[in-house]
Image (cartoon, grey):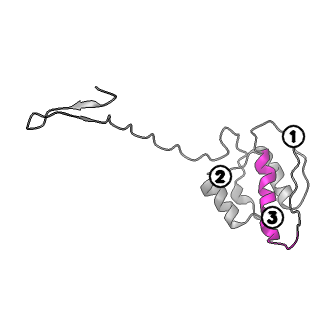
Amino acid sequence: GAGGFAPLPANGNGAGGFAPPPMPTPAPAPPPPTASPNMISSGVAFSSLTNVSAATQRAIREVLGYQYMTPVQAQTLPVCLSGGDVIAKAKTGTGKTMGFLLPSIERVVAAGHAPGRAIHVLVMSP
């Protein structure tokens, strides 16, 4: 082939040509995870959280593809969603971010637009 193109067989009048190489077939998309990727499931479903908005439930299910919480999420989300404070210590990749971010998002959405400069969520990280 010349320049990455394969020669075409001669057509009826004896003229040849060049065609681009065939395109690879894309791999099928993997199925959505039932818990966060590479995380252990607690067996507690996100749908069991009754104080999470329908829009958030839908995003967890359809956008993120999560069905079950990790153990740290199952232990912290009910407390945080009820307005409680939590200090959690767990290894990287166990779902801590979702454990504080989900209640934070719910709090901001519930607060709506307030005039002035109200702070609804403050996250501090080293």
3 or 2: mark nearer the eye: 3
Of the numbered discs 1 and 2, the one sitting upstream in the chain is 2
1 or 2: mark nearer the eye: 1
Q: Which mark is drawn over residue 69?
A: none
Marks 3 & 2, CB-CB < 8 Å contact: no
Using the image, determine if residue 15 lies above or below residue 102.
Answer: above
Q: Nearer the viewer, residue 17 or 86?
A: 17
Using the image, determine if residue 19 lies above or below residue 112.
Answer: above
Q: Position of residue 30 (x, y in %)?
A: 52, 43
SS label for mark 2: loop
- Which stretch appears magenta? 96-116
Of the numbered discs 3 and 2, the one sitting upstream in the chain is 2
Of the numbered discs 1 and 3, the one sitting upstream in the chain is 1
Of the residues shown, which amino acid type is indicated by label 1? Answer: Lys
Of the residues shown, which amino acid type is indicated by label 3? Answer: Val
Q: Position of residue 72 (x, y in %)?
A: 80, 45
Residue at 30% in and 31% down = 5
Question: Which residue position is annotated with label 1?
Answer: 89
Q: Nearer the viewer, residue 82 or 16?
A: 16
Residue at 65% in and 51% down = 66
Q: Main secondary structure of the magenta part?
A: helix
SS label for mark 3: helix
Mark 1 → mark 3, Cα distance in angstroms: 24 Å
Q: Which mark is drawn over residue 108?
A: 3
Quarter of the rendering containing residue 38: top right
Mark 1 → mark 2, Cα distance in angstroms: 23 Å
Q: Which mark is drawn over residue 67?
A: 2
Q: Position of residue 115 (x, y in %)?
A: 85, 74
Task: Look at the image and say whether residue 107 sits in the magenta stretch.
Answer: yes
Extreme-left residue of the structure: 13
Q: Position of residue 87 (x, y in %)?
A: 90, 47
Residue at 88% in and 40% down = 126
